[in-house]
Image (spheres, grey):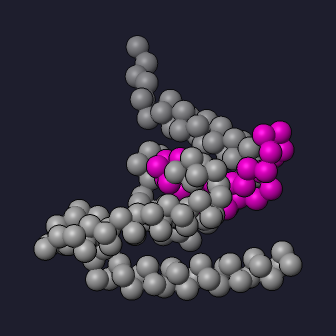
Amino acid sequence: MAVTSRATPRRRESTAAKRARSSHLKRRYGIDSDLYAEMFAAQNGGCAICASPPARQYLAVDHDHLSPDAPPVFVRGLLDFRCNSAISLLRDRPLFVLNAALYLLRALATFAESTENPKAHPRMLRPAEFASARRRLQQIDTALSRLERVAA
């Protein structure tokens, strides 16, 4: 009776899964596994929005949705499931994302002004997050100016 190794079939399944993943990336997004790995490394192994590592095996490939029939024009980055869903629910519209951020910040400010302990709110920004938010606002302004220049 021959002894079979369980490692070989698993390795083949893993190789087949990798080939299927690579084929999917190429067909759907026009990228290969190496480019995905480079993007993943450039994002320090986390979501481009929240920086969380993937909860599943891979981060989602976020791409521009120009029309339902057209292939993606370009890949924007790698996102976790929640962030990918969130920007999709906000219809991939930057102004809607900014409106949502403003809405949340105004609500936090209203809460902070109405209580003796504003730090009690679980989503209150920590001191370092205020500085990070201000840097983000500068980056948004730079990106908006760049876009305005190109679109004019």
> Which residue sits at x=60%, y=48%?
88
Question: Is 23 situated above or below 2?
Answer: below
Residue that sits furthest to the front in the current view: 114
Assign the N terminus to one quadrant of the image. top left
Q: Is residue 75 magenta?
A: yes
Q: Position of residue 97 (x, y in %)?
A: 56, 61
Q: Against 145, is 11 above or below?
A: above
Of the pair 107 and 129, the residue shown nearer to us? 107
The image quadrant of residue 132 is bottom left
Q: Is residue 64 highlighted in magenta? A: yes
Residue 48: x percent and y percent? 53, 65
Q: Residue at x 54, y 33 (%)?
A: 13
User: Could you tell me if residue 3 is visible in this image?
Assistant: yes
| Position in image of residue 131 (x %, y %) | 39, 85
Instruction: Give left or right: position of 24 versus 82.
Output: right
Q: Position of residue 149 (x, y in %)?
A: 80, 83
Q: How many marks?
A: 0
Residue at image position (32%, 72%) is 109
Q: Nearer the viewer, residue 93 or 53?
A: 93
Residue 36 in sight from this viewpoint = no
Q: In this view of the protein, which residue sits in the foreground, 66 or 61?
A: 66
Point out the residue furthest to the right here.
152
Q: Which region of the structure is painted magenta?
A: 58-85
The residue lying furthest to the top in this view is 1
Q: Quadrant of the C terminus?
A: bottom right
Foreground pick, 102 / 9: 102
Question: As drawn, is 63 to the left or to the right of 106?
Answer: right
Does 60 sit left or right of 146 as displayed?
left
